[in-house]
Image: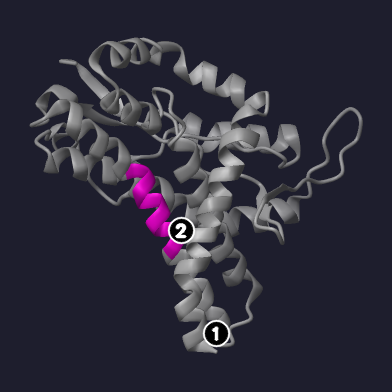
Amino acid sequence: MGHCQSAGNHHIYAARAQRTGSGGCQRQGWPASETMPAVDISNLIQTVLIYALPVLFAITVHEAAHGYAARHFGDNTAAMMGRITLNPIKHIDPIGTILMPLLLYFATSGAFLFGYAKPVPVRFDQLRNPRRDMIWVALAGPASNFVQALLWGVLLVVLVGSGVGERFFIEMCRAGILVNLVMWAFNLFPLPPLDGGRILVGLLPWRQAQWVSRIEPWGFFIVMGLVIAGVVGSLWLRPLMDLGYAVIDFALTPLIALLR
């Protein structure tokens, strides 16, 4: 592992979905004709405004967290390339962060969105203990998303408890929870180049780790195939997000009781 690799090459960072009453994730969409999906422009603008800040925070902190963790464990590659920053411009990929989500939005009438940010460069051979520290570097990104989801939940509870009924801010908080839980859960999927794949490689015995790491050149396409087939959503994303919502609900219970 002497070459420069990236921590978490592709990250889902937004989805047109909302939590159902039972804690699940329900797809939303708009009426479409048989030939061309219809897109409500006002709905599009509203959605973009609601999701813009949560998405920017989610991808920026996620990528910066990888860089901070790598530097902490001995690799300064990201720092030298200016990637340990909360400036979102440094992490935005023109195609993966902007063009692809917009194309998918219009192509599916908002039913499915996918995007990714620029991967943070990490030289695992520069880490003090490569196999162990690789786990922490990979885990830093999803962990930052879960913390953000919790913070958006705190803000939501405070707004509601303070009597703030402005729908825009309430929906933005809900979007912040959703976006970050999607990134947290999806990136933990145990297949390289996702963060979960890095964690798995670090945990497995050497021979098995080498076998899993060889999947990486095709990992993204395998993951996308599993996403399209519904395997990732039904068997991984939805159960993990339900767990994430349950944990956040439990963590916010004292605050909710305090503000009543």
- Asked if residue 8 lies left or right of residue 97, the reply is left
**Residue drawn at (37%, 15%), measured in percent from left and top?**
212
Query: Which residue position holds label 2?
Result: 149
Residue extent of the magenta highlight: 141-150
Which residue lies most toward the right here? 34
- Asked if residue 33 lies left or right of residue 169, the reply is right
Using the rendered view, name the quadrant where residue 75 is placed: top left
Query: Which residue position holds label 1?
Result: 161
- Asked if residue 83 lies left or right of residue 59, the reply is left
Q: Position of residue 80 (x, y in %)?
A: 13, 35
Using the rendered view, name the quadrant where residue 216 is placed: top left
Q: CA distance from mark 1 to mark 2?
A: 18 Å
Of residue 254 and residue 117, the one placed in the foreground of this image is 254
Look at the picture and state if 253 lies above or below 137: below
Identified by mark 1, the residue type is Gly
Do the residues under discs 1 and 2 have CB atoms within 8 angstroms? no
For disc 2, the neighbor class at 10 Å (few under 14, some 14 to 19, many from 20) is: many
Look at the picture and state if 147 lies above or below 252: above
Identified by mark 2, the residue type is Ala
Q: Is residue 248 visible?
A: yes
